[in-house]
């Protein structure tokens, strides 16, 4: 897999959020033209993307902000975790509590609370940029 794309309304805020998780900004670019229209399947695409790389260098997130056509909001505005489609993006972290504390100033909100899975993992789901679900996992056993 090359990357997972996430459409956001505030690219700077999304970059800051994922940087706080330890990802690094690889590149940022404006995208438009016939190739973009053909690839995405929309006419007149103008967007800005930021490619974020995981610390191990094996995974990437493409954060995309559409200038034209303007991104549409999901319905309902905050879809529940069992909505069809991309469910969530999960990150392994060394310190779950510290990660949550660092992400809160970037708008992160826990869906419920931190759970313990068989004393092997501490896990949580939180809302990240554009309302997406980001899962965090800390191995404890």
Image (cartoon, rainbow, N blue to C red):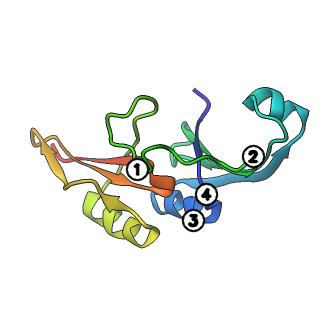
Looking at the rendered structure, the secondary structure element under dot 4 is: loop
Q: Earlier in the sequence, mark 2 or mark 4?
A: 4
Label 3 close to label 1 by CB (< 8 Å): no
Badge 2 is on which residue? 69
Foreground: disc 4 or disc 1:
1
State the separation of the CA atoms marked 2 and 4.
Answer: 12 Å
Which residue ends up furthest to the left in the rendered image?
118
| Rendered residue at 31%/54% (across/down) | 94
**Which circle marks residue 78 in the picture?**
1
Residue 6 location, x and y as percent? 57, 44
| Rendered residue at 55%/65% (across/down) | 16
Foreground: disc 2 or disc 4:
2
State the separation of the CA atoms marked 4 and 3.
Answer: 9 Å
State the separation of the CA atoms marked 3 and 2.
Answer: 20 Å
* Side of 51 where 114 appears, left or right: left
Badge 4 is on which residue? 9
């Amino acid at each position: 897999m090359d990357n997972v794309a996430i459409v956001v309304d505030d690219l700077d805020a999304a970059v800051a959020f994922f940087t706080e998780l330890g990802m690094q900004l690889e590149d940022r670019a404006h995208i438009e033209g016939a190739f973009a229209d053909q690839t995405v399947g929309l006419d007149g695409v103008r967007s800005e993307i930021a490619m974020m790389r995981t610390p191990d260098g094996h995974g990437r997130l493409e954060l995309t902000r559409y200038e034209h056509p303007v991104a549409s909001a999901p319905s309902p505005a905050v879809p529940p975790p069992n909505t069809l489609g991309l469910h969530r993006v999960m990150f392994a972290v060394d310190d779950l509590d510290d990660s949550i504390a660092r992400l809160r100033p970037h708008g992160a909100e826990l869906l419920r609370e931190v759970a313990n899975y068989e004393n092997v993992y501490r896990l949580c789901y939180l809302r990240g940029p554009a309302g997406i679900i980001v899962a965090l996992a800390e191995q404890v056993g």
